[in-house]
Image (cartoon, helix red, strand yellow):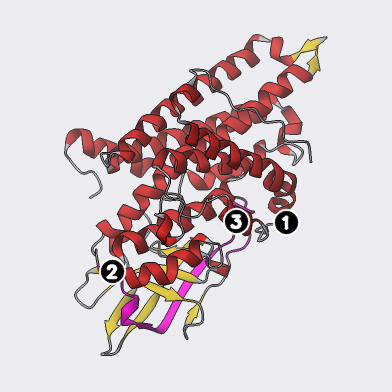
Amino acid sequence: MRPDLFEHPDYYLLDELLTDEHKLVRDATRDWVKRDVSPIIEEYAQNAEFPQQIVKGLAEIGAFGPYIPSEYGGAGLDQISYGLMMQEIERGDSGVRSTCSVQSSLVMYPIYAYGNEEQRMKYLPKLASGEWLGSFGLTEPNFGSNPGGMVTNFKDMGDHYLLNGAKMWISNAPFCHVAVVWAKNEEGRIHGLIVERGMEGFTTPETHNKWSLRASATGELVFDNVKVPKENLLPNKSGLGAPLGCLDSARFGIAWGAIGAAMDCYDTALRYSKERIQFDKPIGAFQLQQKKLAEMITEITKAQLLTFRLGQLKNEGRATTAQISMAKRNNVDMALTIARDARQMLGGMGITGDYPIMRHMMNLESVVTYEGTHDIHLLITGMDVTGIPAFK
């Protein structure tokens, strides 16, 4: 493994807009990634294995529920701090960032926002500390972009609920201790249920043969007459808007995270362009290579400005679903384009594990699809500007 010499690009001096706390959080996360992720991640990705040993470190740097109040074990940080952490962690690997996004935005957030005080005190401290890892059950085998069509359901059995159905493409599923599962009641209303490992009939088979997110564990959540205590129902919000509210938070983190992947590819390509000699000079001296690098830094800078403003709006409680959707789509698409151009700049070396680019490229092929596909996010923006939904 080559040493991690990453230096983050800041072409428009955005650091001047960050608070001292923002920079402290970002730099601490970056240092941790360089020390604990970069030296091992290529091997784990090659072996399609999640590095379980990093969970403790993620908890120690506050990556689980950064914006959750401290009384529940969170760090109590603002949304820009959360975004910067996701940026640095995805600079290390999208799969590691996925673990944090799921834990923070898709498990801890709904328990905090939609749960009661007893649920918050029972689950959030254990999730924040990394003692427990969680997963989020929304997508089903036949319902991805149309989650409202889900067939997973629960029935009121008097002293408990009986849950049946299945979810797939679930990050953290194979080893999760708890799952926030979205299912329909007998009236067809969607509710969130907290399902705990060990409940009879609850299984989590792992998904194998992935070419993407290989250092992240993916699986299914299967419910075969699972008895869920009534106190495990999230009481404060129901309907499809409840899980979609969680996805807003996760997509916000992804918008920042994708910049991290793009930065890593750009930094690698820039460094390589100064070292690789062809025709008696560094390849960075050739116009076509400078064109690629100039376009990369331009797009990264635009994405940085987009997410910083979005972070300000999120802190003020004014960021809309459509604004978050735009940032997620734009930044992931940007990162994919940069990864592909950077891979070409490295030639044959770009496909090897000696450099991170091919791993980022493969990971981003999942990120561009999950939590709202590229095309669906385009339609969300289209609906927002025209007022006409194109989904049906």
The disc labelled 1 sits on which kind of residue? Asn
Q: Are marks 1 and 2 in contact (CB under 8 Å)?
A: no
Quadrant in the rendering for residue 162 = bottom left
Name which residue type carries label 2. His
Q: Position of residue 59 (x, y in %)?
A: 56, 56
Left or right relative to 352: residue 109: left
- Residue name at image x 59 percent, y 19 percent: 292
227 horizontally vs 392: left or right? right
CA separation, marks 3 and 2?
27 Å
What mark, if any, has residue 216 been given in the picture?
Answer: 3
Image quarter of residue 309: top left
Q: Secondary structure at mark 2?
A: strand
Q: Position of residue 73 (x, y in %)?
A: 46, 59
Disc 1 and disc 3 in contact, CB within 8 angstroms: no
The answer to the question of whether label 3 and label 2 lie on touching residues, with beta carbons closer than 8 A, is no
Q: Say if the magenta span includes residue 355.
A: no
Residue labelled with disc 1 = 47
Q: Which residue is mark 2?
A: 191
Q: Which residues are magenta?
A: 207-235
